[in-house]
Amino acid sequence: MVQALKSFPRVATFLRRATNRILHQPELTLPSITIGSDYGSHTVPEAVLDQKSIVYSFGIGTDVSFDLGVIKKYGCN
């Protein structure tokens, strides 16, 4: 699909405007860190969170390793 859009730039522009979305995955690599267990982990950009960050976590079930990891690593309340 991405290659087809490169061949037809006017179509790609129309689709972007019509859907108001990016139609491809940006090629961007950020340093990231994975927090939590193998089952309940999430990967976040490394330099985004700090002690003042507010993290909303939903659906933790029985594995709270991500939540506890964020609290431990960044000193959040």
Image (cartoon, rainbow, N blue to C red):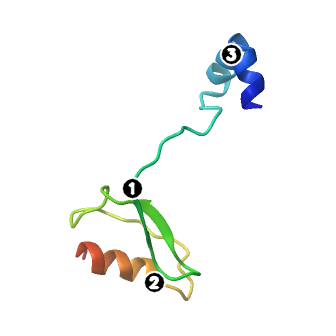
The residue that appears at 29% across and 76% down in the rendered structure is 73
Image height check: is 7 above or below 39? above
Q: Which residue is mark 1?
A: 31
In the picture of the structure, the residue carrying the numbered disc 3 is 14
Expressed as whole percent of the image width and height from the top left, the position of residue 10 reads 69, 10
Question: Which quadrant would residue 49 be assigned to in this image?
Answer: bottom left
Q: Quadrant of the C terminus?
A: bottom left
Question: How many residues crowd around disc 1 within 10 Å: few (fewer than 14), some, or many (20 or more)?
Answer: few
Please tell me which residue is depicted at 56% across the width and 81% down the height of the picture. Answer: 38
Mark 3 vs 1, N-terminal side: 3
Per the image, label 1 sits on a secondary structure element best described as loop
Q: Secondary structure at mark 2?
A: helix
Quarter of the rendering containing residue 39? bottom right
Disc 3 residue crowd, few under 14, some 14–19, many 20+, Cα 10 Å: few
Residues tagged 1 and 2 counted as in contact (Cβ below 8 A): no
Under mark 3, the amino acid is Phe
Mark 3 residue element: helix
What type is the residue that disc 1 sits on? Pro
Residue lying furthest bottom:
62
Residue most toward the top? Answer: 10
Alpha carbon of mark 3 to alpha carbon of mark 1: how far? 33 Å
- Report the quarter where the N terminus lies: top right
Q: Position of residue 57 (x, y in %)?
A: 46, 70
Q: Please name the residue that numbered disc 2 is placed on.
A: 65
Q: Position of residue 22 (x, y in %)?
A: 59, 32
Task: Say whether residue 10 is left or right of residue 68.
Answer: right
Q: Is residue 45 above or below residue 23?
A: below
Can you tell which of label 1 and label 2 is closer to the viewer? 1
Is residue 67 toward the left or the right of residue 26 in the image?
A: left
Vertically, is 53 above or below 72? Answer: above
Nearer to me, 10 or 21: 10
- Alpha carbon separation for disc pair 1 and 2: 21 Å
